[in-house]
Amino acid sequence: MPESKERAPRNRTITLNSEEQVKYKNRLLRLNMPIELQDVINRTIHQDLLQVLDYLPKQSVDLLFIDPPYNLNKTFNSNNFKKKNLDTYADWLDAYLDKLEAVLKPTSSIYICSDWQSSPAVYAAIKNRFQVRNRITWERDKGRGASKNWKNSSEDIWFCTVSDTYTFNVDAVKLKRKVIAPYTVDGTPKDWDITDKGNYRLTHPSNLWTDLTIPFWSMPENTDHPTQKPEKLVAKVILASSNFGDVIFDPFLGSGTTSVVAKKLGRKYFGVELDEMYACLAEKRLEIAEAELSIQGYAEGVFWERNTLNEQVRSIDKKRNSQHDKTLHQQDLFLLAEM
């Protein structure tokens, strides 16, 4: 459905007009037979997932990011999802995983999103299929309060691998934090740095993520998709569990965040989305990403805490002006170009 409602002047939500809907619809791919990887790479497939899984290239995917409908009553534009009992939801998910396994390499990693209620069903579907490595819990920074319960402010992501041989780039996903209680040895900072903007340290990533912001109206990545994940969240997954040029697949693509972040970070990608409007939004966002490669909250090869955008901009400008910094990683160059 093309854009129809009025927006505030400063609203940056990505929308579609009628002409764009036609333009991007013509870019969408539909499958009716098995295809090779080169035929699907960097494309958005607009189709029912179960109709296309048998056509996708076998053992072609390095990283599988799955953000399925949670087990809630939810409307996704033209489609509705109805809540099931947990056993039925686990069976529903298992039917997709049974076919998704075929696209994975022996070295692939898998991330599956869920809310706290769905999480046991997700674990039931994956525990005998993959090697479960961890359960990440991330803080949602907004949501309705509750008068007779704790406010629901977290979601889970299950991290799995096909085998014991897999990619995990720990140095690519470190978090830059301000040092509250500096520790020194003989007057020298230990594991932290002094800068003209404050004292910072790079910390190893944990399975508790508290630095994310849910997309909202003033963020340039925002769309009207009701369960859109932050680009920063997906960037953590992609940088940790894939390498430059690897293939990323999202079978419930939504408005395209996984493909967009993969493109910004120099990965190959493809995704499947049932709803035409969301698939077209994904294509529009991919077009925007050709000129705008930044990811809010990720700069200079590190992730920053929330509410530090001004410090990030100053830090990047300072690095740009330096004539001596010749050591930027290839991925950082790709990310910072035209930023």
Image: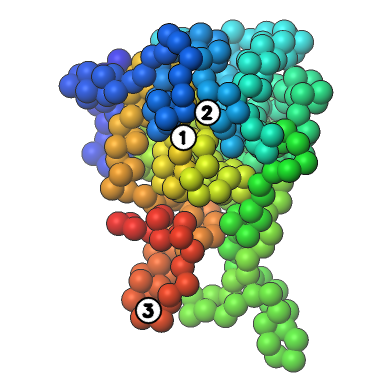
Q: Quadrant of residue 218?
A: top left
| Residue 25, x across and y down, in percent | 28, 19
Residue 85 versus residue 281 in the image, above or below: above
Which residue carries the number 1 mark? 269
| Amino acid type of the residue tagged 3 in the rendering | Ser
**How many angstroms separate mark 1 from mark 2 (CA)?**
8 Å
| Residue 172, x across and y down, in percent | 59, 57
| Residue 265, x across and y down, in percent | 45, 48
The answer to the question of whether label 1 and label 2 lie on touching residues, with beta carbons closer than 8 A, is yes
Q: Earlier in the sequence, mark 1 or mark 2?
A: 2
What residue is drawn where x is 48% and y is 53%? 297
Rate crowding at label 1 as few (under 14), some (14 to 19) or many (20 or more) other CA atoms within 10 Å.
Answer: many
Tag on residue 322?
A: 3
**How many angstroms separate mark 3 from mark 1 (CA)?**
34 Å
| Residue 32, x across and y down, in percent | 43, 9
What residue is drawn where x is 55% and y is 48%? 243
Which residue carries the number 2 mark? 250
